[in-house]
Amino acid sequence: MALPRYAFPQPTDDLAPIVAEIQKRHDETVQRLQQWIRQPSIAAENRGVNEGCALTMQMLKDAGFQSVTKLPTGGQPGIFATLDAGAPRTLGLYFMYDVKQVDPAEWSSPPWDAALVDKPGFGKVVMGRGAVNQKGPEAAFIAALHAIRGAGRKLPVNLVLVAEGEEEIGSPHFPQVVRRPEVLAALKKAEGIFMPSASQAPDGSVTLTLGAKGVIECELTSSGERWGRGPEKDIHSSLKARVDSPAWHLVKALSTLVSEDGNDPAIAGFADKARPLSAAEKKMIAVAASRMNEEVAKKSLGVKRWIHDASFQESLDMLMSRPTVNIEGLVGGYTGPGGKTILPHKAVAKLDLRLVPDMTAAEALAALKAHLAKHGYGDIDVNMTGGYDPNSTSPDAKIIKVEETVYKRAGIDPIMLPRNAGSWPGYVFTGEPLRLAAGHFGLGHGSGAHAPDEYYVIESSNPKVQGIDGAVRSYVEFLYELAA
């Protein structure tokens, strides 16, 4: 308890009734989040997505959005919602209602139970798929709207919300939502767009990012039928002496995509347009490296060394500036107990390629296909399942300045980095024709996104980290600061 406590100052007279309402509605807020988590919505499996969309729409209506519309796409539906408070300023919001797949056997608490469990070092958390990515932060924002209205106040800004149900598969149809004429017209009135997040690390610090890498998610399939060599069905492995292997063909193709150590992309033309870090970005990274704890970062990732045995600052430089070629998974032949002695007729690799400004997904995909063809692997089928361009926002943008102000008011001096090494489809907002500033914001903590035992802190025992009520208040503060 001798550690510094990060907490908001006493609320002003204007906000005091709202803060009281947040506390009064604590149980309601938690139950709403639990209800949301208990509804699976997995785009990759086409599981519960329509039900997840309907539940999200109802929650938005309950929170005061006057217009909530389901928008069909070539895939899972999107949502367009507006809340007109008669305010002079408008804020854009990005939500996602889909979540990643789960293997229940890997979880200590069933992923769809949304159970409240005690987590040492953090306090009471809700555990379940989507708890932190993104239903926890989004539910906290919705709770902020309930608290403002419950206190008898009008929202200080108007809201324009767009949501999708395919973020976890690379947002392949999200442009169809945003680029509808009525959605573009509404978003053009916005000061910027933001995505709710649980931004606090376990030590209470916050890293504020000014964009995100782009991504291509794709499947590379090698088959005897398409190759014209190897078998058209699985055959006995003894026949390898005279029959080509589509699995080895794929492995050899994959090895051409990167350097010998597997770390540097070797696809011709892939990174030609990658923008080097500016002097200002390098300085930003150096400051961040001096404030972050390298050993904590390594421990959280379960690694002992960075690639090329780089220093911590060099590793951050690479994280911010380098495109990547990553194998997510390899599948081919028999992988069950014991051996099966087959020569498989097909093998599949799932890849993701991360992109930095000024690369584009379309050009990167073309470079990948051209590279494979040039090296004699043009028969390998490349299926892009999702992806999009990188996005960037200026540190001087109003929405970023508002985020900084609210964090500092809570006693936190945020660490700033040029971009997130992960990806979200912010390019549809920051690019043409909208050119909106975009950012992530929100106090609170959670972890385990895409992993077992995903959680979001409800009642914090860590004096440096806000629980869900503190997260709700951070959104109230954000909305009023933007209005001011």
Image: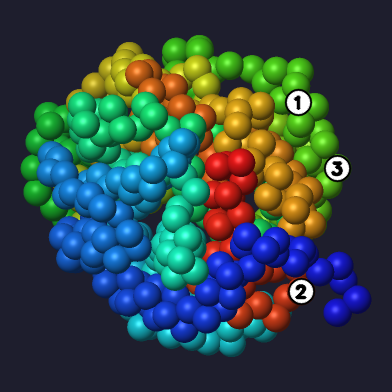
Q: What element carries label 1?
A: helix
173 over 38 or under it: above or below: above
- The percent coordinates of residue 357 (x first, y second) are 52, 21
Q: How far apart are marks 1 and 2 (CA)?
A: 32 Å
Q: Label 2: which residue? A: 463
Looking at the picture, the colour scheme in use is rainbow
* Viewport quadrant of the N terminus: bottom right
- Residue 75: x and y in percent read 15, 44
* Residue positioned 49% across, 69% down in the render: 151
Q: Name the residue rendered at 62%, 60% in the picture.
A: 14
Estimate the x, y position of residue 317 in percent, counting from the top left: 70, 31
Which of the pair 429/207 is nearer the observer? 429
Q: Is mark 3 on a helix, strand or loop?
A: helix
Which class describes the residues within 10 Å of circle 2: few (<14), some (14-19), or many (20+)? some
CB atoms of marks 1 and 3 within 8 Å: no
Is residue 334 placed above or below 351 in the rendered structure?
below
The foreground one among 338 and 216 is 216
Disc on the earlier residue, 1 or 3? 1
Q: Quadrant of residue 274?
A: top right
> Quick check: 44 left or right of 227?
right
Residue extending farthest right: 2
Disc ID at residue 238: none
- Which amino acid, mark 1? Lys
Q: Which amino acid does label 2 sit on?
A: Pro
